[in-house]
Image (spheres, helix red, strand yellow):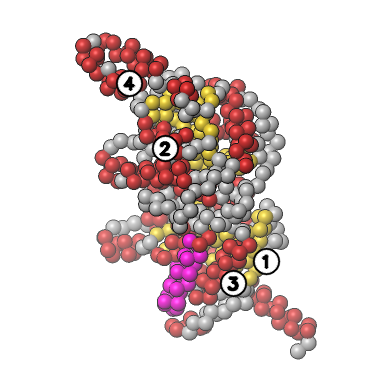
Amino acid sequence: MSIQERLDDLRRRKEQAAQGGGQRRIQAQHDKGKLTARERVNLLADPGSFEEFDSLVLHRATDFGIDQQRYPGDSVVTGFARIEGRPVAIFAQDFTVVGGSVSEVAAEKICKVMDLAMKTGVPIVGVNDGGGARLQEGVSSLKGYGEIFRRNVRASGVVPQISVVLGPTAGGAVYSPSITDFVFMVEDHSYMFITGPDVVKAVTMEEVTDEDLGGASIHATRSGVAHFAFDTEETVLTEVRRLLAFLPSNNMEEPPIVEMGDDPRRRDEDMLTVLPENESQPYDVREVIYRIADGADFLEVHADYAQNIVCGFARLGGRAVGIVANQPLYLAGTLDIAASLKAARFVRFCDCFNIPIVTLADIAGYLPGTAQEHGGIITHGAKLVYAYAEATVPKVTVILRKAFGGGYIAMGSKHLGADVNLAWPTGSIAVTGPDAAAGIVFRAQLELDPASRPQLIADYQERFANPYVSASRGYIDDVIDPRDTRLKLIRTLEMLSTKVERLPNKKHGNIPL
């Protein structure tokens, strides 16, 4: 056989692999409003940058007629590409091949690209759209899932891992995305559940649809499984690219510096109008975030889940930062179970990947009630305390308004190891609010003279519930003009850019799970 004949044979094999399960199944995918695996990869990666691996792999199973369904590359597309010029590892399940089910060789392909990603220190993006374990392969398929999970755990905190769920993901298949750092879903096409509607009905007699059981909106608002949910696949993949732009490639690198053309010395006069004059009136803390961030660019994480706390990425003077802020618009910005979990995981991610943490505190404390206590707020609330105390990245906190009790401590206080703590003149730091405090401290006097209550509250406010008592003890490093918040944060982060802090040598801590 001549070299030209061999090249023609190679071309035919590659063309066959590019067709996945064939044109009929590709059309069926399009008819559902879904893209194919390779179309998704092409949208995700920089044009012409994708280098595919194992496109000629064939599965080895023979039971139940599966040997009649052999397609080059099997049910997953794997390889390396560039996103915004930076290398990433990618795998994308191909629903046109045996419903995207994971065979032994498909798992081997995924594991290979994950191993290479860890060796080379690049992020891993996995696009999930498949029917779970391949039934015709039995335990060989289950073994493959276990190998993937083990690599997810090994890669955790080493390279960023992003899961993009663009189709059904059920049973054991959901555990790989749940171990990764961020989960993206698309409305109407993404589903994640341990057991599907048929099993739920058989066991509990409960009738539920795929969407109501494990759709994107459910996981983005109620379970917290999904960090991002969008209307279209194209939007999802664009936002994955946007997220990666904030992140370093691995835990040994710093996040990329991106100049946004926003003057770091910019002073925002409108910052004085953000807080209402009535201290009990809510406001949107994102108005503070937009004013301090470069170009008002803020990528919110878990935007529709536990909305009493806001987490996300921004840039200050070109440097990527993670922002954690109490949100007075919801539950008065108190910490409940969901908010504690959301913020703790975000803080730990930032710490893994050298992203400084900026905390904006306005908190009355933890949410009271039997539902919270019986649900384990003690343990779950402690996770946020643990996360802040464990983090060694630069940590800067600004107290905007109130900071009471355990909420003050948990939200990046000096006592948990924050490097620099600032406060606005409106900052009020105390064990509890002035009204409640006065009722306790001056109880005997109030019993004799109830009319003195307003004056006693004012006395307590003046003596304790302000930033100056804490500043006099060094718990607040400076009380600042709100208009200078952006400049103060940028200068502080520049000063902390060379921070080095090491925890005691140990295998790992035992976070209260």
Kindly state the secondary structure of the residue where label 3 is placed.
loop
**Which residue has dot 3 on it?**
20
Residue 315 versus residue 48: which sits nearer the camera? 315
Marks 3 and 2: which is nearer the front?
A: 2
Between marks 3 and 2, how big is the CA–CA gap? 51 Å
What predominant SS class does the magenta segment belong to?
helix
Q: Is residue 134 magenta?
A: yes
Q: Quick one: label 3 or label 2, which is nearer the N terminus?
A: 3
Label whose residue precedes the other's in the sequence (4 or 2): 2
Real-space CA distance between mark 4 and mark 2, rounded to the nearest whole angstrom: 22 Å
Looking at the rendered structure, which numbered label has been put on residue 352? none
**Is residue 132 something that shows in the picture?**
yes
- The dot on residue 435 is 4
Q: Which amino acid does the dot numbered 1 rest on?
A: Glu
Task: From the image, tell me which residue sits under label 2.
Answer: 410
Label located before the other in sequence (3 or 4): 3
Left or right position of 205 against 164: left
Q: CA distance from mark 1 to mark 4?
A: 64 Å
Q: Mark 3 to mark 4: distance in Å?
A: 68 Å
Residue drawn at (54%, 30%), measured in percent from left and top?
288
Question: Nearer the observer, disc 4 or disc 2?
Answer: 2
Which dot marks residue 51?
Answer: 1
Q: Residue at x 55, y 40 (%)?
A: 394
The answer to whether mark 1 and mark 4 are in CB contact below 8 A is: no
Q: Which stretch did the figure color magenta?
A: 132-153
Where residue 434 appears, as percent x and y from the top left, is 35, 21
Q: Nearer the viewer, residue 505 or 310?
A: 505
Horizontal relation, residue 114 to residue 82: left or right:
left
Circle nearer the viewer, 3 or 4: 4
Point out the frontmost of discs 2 and 1.
Answer: 2
Residue type at mark 2: give it.
Answer: Ala
Q: CA distance from mark 3 to mark 1?
A: 17 Å
